[in-house]
């Protein structure tokens, strides 16, 4: 039990700047899309940044709050879908 108390105190002492930095990084990572554009008007988008971001959020050592991280990733995913953010592979 002593270990969990030390860990919870260590997470609560996280700086606000580190918290903001993590949220900004989740926003940038979550907005990345991989789009396959074969010849023609068809486009196949894959939210590669959201997949990587969910992996990071699930395995993060200093957990902020996974619900907040997932919400930021979801918003970033929708922003990245409508704006040209990510990689286009033209076939």
Image (cartoon, grey):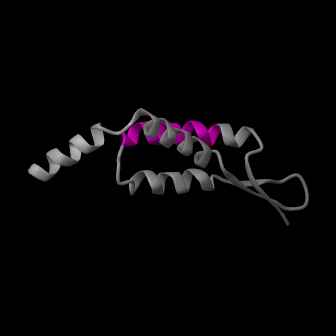
**Residue at 15 percent of width and 45 percent of height:** 5
The answer to if 68 sits in the magenta stretch is yes
Pick the front one: 19 or 35: 19
Q: Residue 7 location, x and y as percent?
A: 22, 48
Image position of 23 with respect to 49: above or below: above
Q: Main secondary structure of the magenta part?
A: helix
- Is 40 positioned to the left or the right of 25 in the image? right
Quarter of the image where the C terminus is located: bottom right
**Residue at 36 percent of width and 39 percent of height:** 65
**Residue at 16 percent of width and 49 percent of height:** 4
Q: Residue 57 location, x and y as percent?
A: 43, 50
The answer to if 33 sits in the magenta stretch is no
- Is 24 positioned to the left or the right of 7 in the image? right
Quadrant hosting residue 82: top right
Quadrant hosting residue 58: bottom left
Q: Residue 53 location, x and y as percent?
A: 52, 52
Name the residue furthest left: 1
Name the residue furthest top: 16
Numbered disc total: 0
**Residue at 64 percent of width and 45 percent of height:** 31
- Is 91 positioned to the left or the right of 79 in the image? right
Pick the front one: 57 or 35: 57
Q: Magenta residues?
A: 64-78
- Is 17 positioned to the left or the right of 40 in the image? left
């Amino acid at each position: 039990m002593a270990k969990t108390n030390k860990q919870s105190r260590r997470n609560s002492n996280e700086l606000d700047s580190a918290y903001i930095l993590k949220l900004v990084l989740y926003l940038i990572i979550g907005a990345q899309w991989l789009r396959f554009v074969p010849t023609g008007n068809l486009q196949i988008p894959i939210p590669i940044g959201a997949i990587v971001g969910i992996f990071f959020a699930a395995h993060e050592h200093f957990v902020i709050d996974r619900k907040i991280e997932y919400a930021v990733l979801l918003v970033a995913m929708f922003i990245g879908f409508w704006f040209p953010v990510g990689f286009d592979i033209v076939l």
